[in-house]
Amino acid sequence: MTRYRPRRPSSGPSTFDIAERDAFAALSAGSLDAVRSSAETWRNGLTAFITLVTTGVVIKGRDTTSALTIGWRAALTLLIGGGLLAALVGLWQALSAQAGTRPRATTLNAVHRRYGSVAAYQVALAIAAARRLRRAQYLVAVALSLLLAGIVVTWWAPADSGKKEATYLKVSHPGGPSCGTLRSADGGELRLKSPGRHTPVVIELSAVTNMKMVKTCG
């Protein structure tokens, strides 16, 4: 049975190899702090973004949707609500990347057994934080897309015409019932602008026997 014995290298590592090893070790040691610093920046930006959007929705949301039909209002609710939800989940991912996961008790033996070295353990933490940060960035893109789509809907969605029907005044008097929009009521006279007539109908207030509001003059 042939036995393989390790051989001594013909030459030691060069100065360049040693410098590269030390540079990589320094880069690995600082990778976790770099990722968490970037995650903190994203967290601050997302917090300000969510605050701004939420404030705008609370202040203008009712006025924006009140003139829309139910279908368009539901679509707008899904877009705005989905955008806010994606932004909140993205904020949570950024917070997780910055602060790390739930702290767990560990030992040096456990680190060596699973990762081989403390340096490899730090690199693994940096990789996990970077993945969460990438998820946060992706969710921000989704949130922006949904919110922009919601803004476009508010620009182009048709208004609910049923809520803008004209309200007419129907007046009963000896000359027959008259119906139209109220123009004025002064000098003892009531003036109505009836549909299809250019000149208003003038009715003496003393002759009015009944008045009521109607949606149509038909």
Image (cartoon, rainbow, N blue to C red):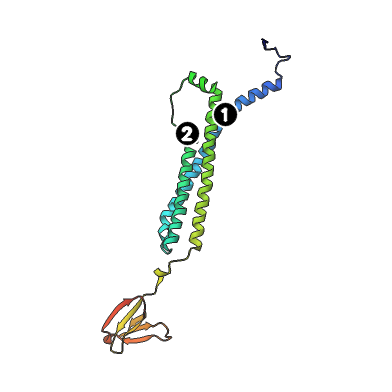
Closest to the observer: 33 or 82? 82
Picture layout, residue 159 above or below residue 98: below
Closest to the observer: 208 or 79? 79
Residues at discs 1 and 2 in contact (Cβ within 8 Å)? no
* Residue wearing tag 1: 30
Picture layout, residue 143 above or below residue 107: below
Quarter that holds the N terminus:
top right
Question: Disc 1 versus disc 2: distance between alpha carbons?
Answer: 16 Å
Q: Position of residue 74 (x, y in %)?
A: 43, 57
Tell me which amino acid carries mark 1: Gly
* Residue 197 placement, left or right of 38: left
* Residue wearing tag 2: 99
Q: Residue at x 35, y 87 (%)?
A: 202
Quarter that holds the C terminus:
bottom left
Q: Where is residue 138 in the image (x, y as percent from the top left)?
A: 54, 44
Q: Which residue is drawn at 65% across and 23% down?
A: 21
Q: Where is residue 24 in the image (x, y as percent from the top left)?
A: 63, 26
